[in-house]
Amino acid sequence: MKKTITDLIEALKIRLLLHRYPLLIYYQRITKEQLLKEKKLTYSVPPSYINTLPKMTYKSLVSSGAGRDVNRFLKNANIPPSQIKNILDIGSGLGDYYTLFKHYFPTAKYTGIEITDQLLSLSRHRYPSANFVKGSLLVPNTINKPNQLIFISGVLHYMVSDLDMAMQHLKNNAQKYLLITRMPIIKHHRSNQIFIRQKIYTQSQTDINHIIVKKPSYFIDKLKPKFSLITSDCLSEVYKLQNDNCEPLIHNIMLFRRK
């Protein structure tokens, strides 16, 4: 019962804040960047990642999950391979998307950027022919060369405190295409509010949730007028808020093209 009362109090706080400040960014707890900066908790690799250590082939990557969805999306987008010379994968994790991009753009140079040392080491070991570097979208000079395609998957919702800055960096550095995927954008059935859910895994496996409130068109608006949305789709993954009935919105995979 105590948890239910706490949930109701939190929901009431959100409603009151949104009524007064409709465009407010609301934080339940501190952000990942603050955790790392203040060293209150040590960022670590989720157990689910550790269990996926075997090197992925193109066939195994696209057989299920987000890999299958992104593969279908790229196939339908039909981007000419000749247009893509450099690919930047921001938040490359274990590097598995390297195999997907080599399938569609075999001559393009792939670079993966990852902030977590453990994942960076694992990706380099698993895909020695790819280029993986330590960095973040928010770190100056991380993106220091032209990239015809920038891919960012499951990353932006970790940057809730600097989301506007992150979008500006993407806008400035994607020469031709920008592919944003795995955005946990959901709609709460009871309140009809739009949420972006964030999860952080720590060494103690603490699950820290952050919620920001944005309009569904936020990403489209931030990239105007330089980019236009070519197509969007819904991933098969379903994100839910604990103890609440929510549904994913369609704009959790988006392909933009520079005008």
Image (cartoon, rainbow, N blue to C red):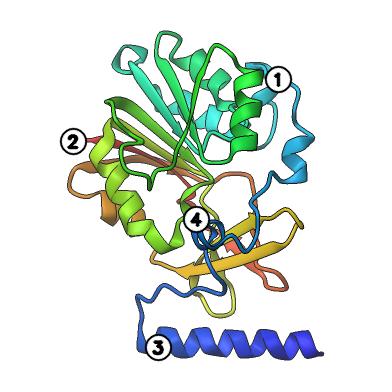
Of the residues shown, which amino acid type is indicated by label 4? His
Q: CA distance from mark 3 to mark 1?
A: 49 Å
Q: Secondary structure at mark 1?
A: loop
Please tell me which residue is depicted at 75% across the width and 86% down the height of the picture: 4
- Sequence order check: which comes first, mark 1 or mark 4? 1
Please tell me which residue is depicted at 36% across the width and 89% down the height of the picture: 20
Of the residues shown, which amino acid type is indicated by label 2? Lys
- Sequence order check: which comes first, mark 2 or mark 4? 4
Check disc 3 and report the residue beneath it: 19
242 left or right, relative to 164: right
Q: Which image quadrant is residue 38 in?
A: bottom right
Q: Say which mark, if any, is on residue 259.
A: 2
Q: CA distance from mark 2 to mark 4?
A: 26 Å
Please say if 13 is above or below 178. below
- Mark 3 nearby-residue class (10 Å; few <14, some 14–19, many ≥20): few
- Sequence order check: which comes first, mark 4 or mark 3? 3
Which corner quadrant holds the N terminus?
A: bottom right
- Mark 4 nearby-residue class (10 Å; few <14, some 14–19, many ≥20): many
Of the residues shown, which amino acid type is indicated by label 1? Lys
Q: CA distance from mark 4 to mark 3?
A: 23 Å
Check disc 4 and report the residue beneath it: 157
Please say if 14 is above or below 75. below
- Sequence order check: which comes first, mark 3 or mark 2? 3
176 left or right, relative to 195: left
* Residue toward you, 165 or 190: 165
Check disc 1 and report the residue beneath it: 55
Could one spot residue 216 in this view of the protein? no
* Residue toward you, 188 or 31: 31
Q: CA distance from mark 1 to mark 4?
A: 27 Å
Badge nearest the viewer, 2 or 4 = 4
- Mark 2 nearby-residue class (10 Å; few <14, some 14–19, many ≥20): few
